[in-house]
Amino acid sequence: MAYRVLITDDSPAMRSFVRRVIELSGFELSACFEAGDGAEAMDVLKKEWVDAILTDINMPGVDGEELLRRLAADELLCGIPAIVISTDATQNRIARLLALGARGYVTKPFRPETLRAELERTLGVPCD
Amino acid sequence: MEQIIVGMADCKVGHLAGQVLATYALGSCIGLSVYDPKAAVGGLLHYMLPDSTIDPARSLLNPYMFADTGIPKLLEQVCGQGASRRRLVAHAAGGASIMDPQAIFDIGKRNYLALRKILWKAGILLAGEAVGGANARTVRLEIGSGRLWLQEGNGQKELVPSFPQKGGTTWPTGS
Amino acid sequence: MIRAALARAVGDVLESMFFLDTLGEAGEPPAGADTVKVHLSFEGDPPGCFEMRLARRAANAIAADFLGEDAGSLTPRQSTDVTLELANMICGAVLSRIESSATFRLGAPRLVADMVADDTREAWPEETTRYTVETGSGTLTAAIRMETRTCTATEKYAS
């Protein structure tokens, strides 16, 4: 199966890193969209369907928490699994984001294998 | 069953069912095992130091002594026997602090970080690892099945169960 | 406690995503070192600011390791992006350790100025906690300053 994913982070470097982890994890990507904040992410989602969203939280403009709220409020988009990737490891934040609908949470800094495990848990193990 | 010993600063590749690659006494050294379940080709590298720039002449004589020269050689050799880099399942063992319990020189950790950096650049993520601590380890890779065993202290465990035999339609991604 | 959190954060970030072993604390670079400086502010309890100074040679090497590329093939833009993200991650990791029950918010990291070879070393602001490591290609100094409260309860409710 080929996946379509959306990576949302204001850091182009982190978007590259995450994309590389997804590719090296054995997931075939038929499309990989990138967004610099939550507003850009919603613009992408108006036009494209994705199988998963990976999002940072601390972003200028529409942040990741607001993005999760908007996804949860949309009857079509609320079914897309979202994995949060954030520097914030505080329990309060993690609990709040999971309550907003995040399916997974990876704290920066992270090992590539940690993100792979979260992807496999959320999307299932890729098959060659 | 043909057991092929991989010594210190050594590397062996197998492509025949019945071959078992084995390396012993992994202390601060790293044993890197790679296996392509579709091609049924695997290799085992036992390296001692992270960086060949400390002794370039030595690395020319024996590239397997160092991570930065040994790992590319291992990958080149397994791919030369028909493995696909994209399908390789990689495991690491070792990187312990045996002669250096205070980890002052930290060779084990440096070996481990060198491994991760080189594999990242080569486009390979580790499927599993048994690293650090203070115990020596032994690793065995069975070429026909892809089974990988780890021995540490008095215990032995199977890190990777047998892959489906060549000709199957789906392949798990490893342990 | 802040210094320990800073040290731990630097080590964790460099090890997990940049595959670097920093071999403990190092001395700060000499005056005249070619250094890249990143600054970011954060809101929290208390708020403050974070600064990272990274030897330029180290910035390029670190960026290459992060992206899985050869150092020679990187653009200056890529090197800068990684440097900014490195600062972002170290700061976030420190704050997560010292403000574990509060919510903090990081501002965007910005490249303040390229500190080119100069005879003077820019002084650190007062009450800055700093930690320096050797990356193998040059030093990295991480510094954090938490703002102290300027208004006591007595003053607040006076008059």
Image (cartoon, rainbow, N blue to C red):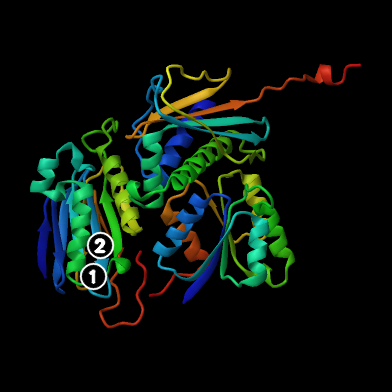
Residue C118 rendering spot, x and y as whole percentages: 43, 21
Residue at position x 91%, y 16% in the image: C159
> Is C20 positioned to the left or the right of C129 in the image?
left
Residue position for label 1: B83
Task: Left or right? Give the position of B169 relative to C91.
Answer: left
Question: Which amino acid does the dot numbered 1 rest on?
Answer: Ala
Figure quadrant of residue B40: bottom left
Q: Residue at the location (36% across, 52% down)? A: C69
Regarding residue B142, the answer to whether it shows in the image is: no
Q: Which residue is mark 2?
A: B34
Q: Position of residue C34 (x, y in %)?
A: 40, 28
Compare residues A123 and B122 and report the one nearer the observer: B122
Image spot of residue C153 (x, y percent)? 80, 20
Which chain is home to disc 2? B
| Mark with earlier residue (2, 1) | 2
Place of residue C124 in the rendered image (x, y in percent of width and height, measured from the top left) = 53, 20
How crowded is the residue under tag 2: few (<14 C-alpha within 10 Å), some, or many (20+)?
many
Quadrant of the image occupied by residue C112 = top right
Q: CA distance from mark 2 to mark 1?
A: 10 Å
Classify the position of the C terminus of chain B by image quarter: bottom left
The amino acid at mark 2 is: Val
The lab-note entry on whether marks 2 and 1 share a chain reads yes
Give the chain of mark 1.
Answer: B
Residue at 52% of width from left, 52% of height from top? Answer: A12
Marks 2/1 in contact by CB < 8 Å: the verdict is: yes
Q: Is residue C153 above or below residue B171?
A: above
Q: Is residue B65 above or below residue A98?
A: above
Q: Is residue C142 visible?
A: yes
Q: Give the quadrant of residue A25.
A: bottom left
- Taking depth in this image into account, of C80 and A16 the one nearest to the observer is C80
Nearer the observer, A5 or C114: C114
